[in-house]
Amino acid sequence: MPLYQNQTLKIYNSLTGEKEIFEPLNDGYVGMYVCGPTVYSYVHLGNCRTFISFDLVFRYLKHLGYKVRYVRNITDAGHLENDAEEGEDRITKKARLEQLEPMEIVQKYTVDFHNTLQKFNNLPPSIEPTATGHIVEQIETVKSIIENGLAYEANGSVYFDVLKFNESEDYGILSKRKVEDLIANTRDLAGQSHKKNPQDFALWKKAEPQHIMRWPSPWGEGFPGWHLECTVMSNKYLGEQFDIHGGGMDLKFPHHECEIAQGTACNGKPPVKYWMHANMLTLNGKKMAKSTGNNILPVDLFSGDNEVLSKAYHPSVVRFFILQANYKSILDFSDEALIASEKGFEKLMNAIQLLEKLTTSKSSGIDVKAWKQSCYDAMNDDFNSPVLIAQLFEAVKYINACHHHKLELTQEDIQTLKTTMSDMCFDVLGLQKIDVESKVDSKQNELIDLLIDLRNQARAVKDFKQSDAIRDRLLELGVQLKDTAQGTSYEFSN
Ligand SMILES: [Zn+2]
């Protein structure tokens, strides 16, 4: 029996503003779509957080036993500068600046994106379609929206008729905006004069002579509007309606609002059951921006090569840090916070190693089954990873207490701890096992060896007061000495 039959998962639905019990459209199957990157630059940390958040969702749904089809697109055309309706294509602009073909830019930054997410131990999506690979489908969708009377052609471009759509549907339903307010707040910029109304958005854009990424269409040569590809590719691979649509908070408006409008205009029903949005991140309390220098790339974290960092961090430590905040909260990156996370991460890995060495008892001093369910309860509560991590640290306390013979655990309970710790840390949170002892730098090992030598010298002259003091002080620092026939060894405890 799949686990989901015994667990009640709740998801915060951005569309309704409520936590709702998750009931997929087809029993046992989940269709999930997440807006992928526009591949015109190195992936930034904010994007990584979004994709790690949805990797957590993907992993947990799979862990519960659902068959999940996870579609995440690559935007390789149609995304203009500043998310605007007019301007240069981001990829074309970068191609000009780097003196490369647009598709060389796409390849270069797609490879970087995949490499970075792989370092973070993200699972690849089930399907990763590209906008340029679905031009034919996008043209067909534009045609059907025109046929349904909700789009119009003007001077070689096709625009979505927001006011017409809003007569029978609710444009603004996701972002809680009213069309009247949008009209009042939209300034009619030069170049938008072919639209009936300034809030109408492009489904297809006429290509100006300098625009090199262009395709033939019934309306002349052009390229698809940015919002269209997600509607078309989610519809193609997940159907007219699917379960979960995710993305960064910044995509809620206009991008996701436009997706709802396009999907509804096409199929007569809203495309998505649960909308999920991951929040942004800041660096040292301030918005990240290249222009102010308050900026950090994932590669900097792994190399330590950035002035805001004191050292390099393992990608799993960064992932652990990210998951210590709920995906809906703003996350602030700082060197101090990463150092604290690294300590916590090592403590966790240490406890997992210790689990192999525990001695079993006839009875248990704690209710391990209840603890296990509390881990699931945390994840069932809208993928609340910080609460799950707090539960994992409860287990660290049990493990250390058992190791120091201050808590008894049965063999069965130790086994439950082992499988649950492994399931939650590696399958669900997606952390990578790091051998903690090998991470300790050699200087520290040399210092411990020196103290062992001093203790042995004290023992040789029967100065047991001194030798015991060294042993006890080391134990306080988390270093446990073990005297064997082969000499003195040590291990790190907590
Ligand atoms: Zn999208």
Image (cartoon, rainbow, N blue to C red):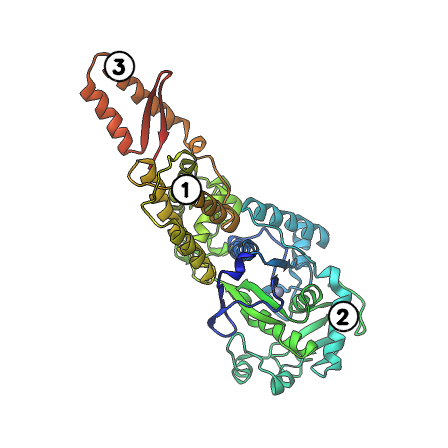
Q: CA distance from mark 1 to mark 3?
A: 39 Å
Task: Determine the quadrant in which ligand 1 lies.
Answer: bottom right
Q: Is residue 287 above or below residue 347?
A: below
Q: Is residue 130 left or right of residue 422?
A: right
In primary-sequence order, the first of circles 2 and 1 is 2
First in sequence: mark 3 vs mark 2: 2
Residue 414 tag number: 1
Residue at point 50% right, 77% down? 176
Name the residue type under label 1.
Ile
Q: Nearer the viewer, mark 2 or mark 1?
A: 1
- Where residue 251 sits: x, y (%)? 55, 66
Give the Cα distance between marks 3 and 2: 83 Å
- Numbered mark located on residue 457 in the image: 3
Q: Report the Cα–Cα distance between label 2 and label 1.
A: 59 Å
Nearer the camera: disc 1 or disc 3: 1
Residue farthest toward the bottom in the current orientation of the protein: 167
Q: For the residue carrying disc 1, how many other residues have a C-alpha within 10 Å: few (<14), some (14-19), or many (20+)? A: many
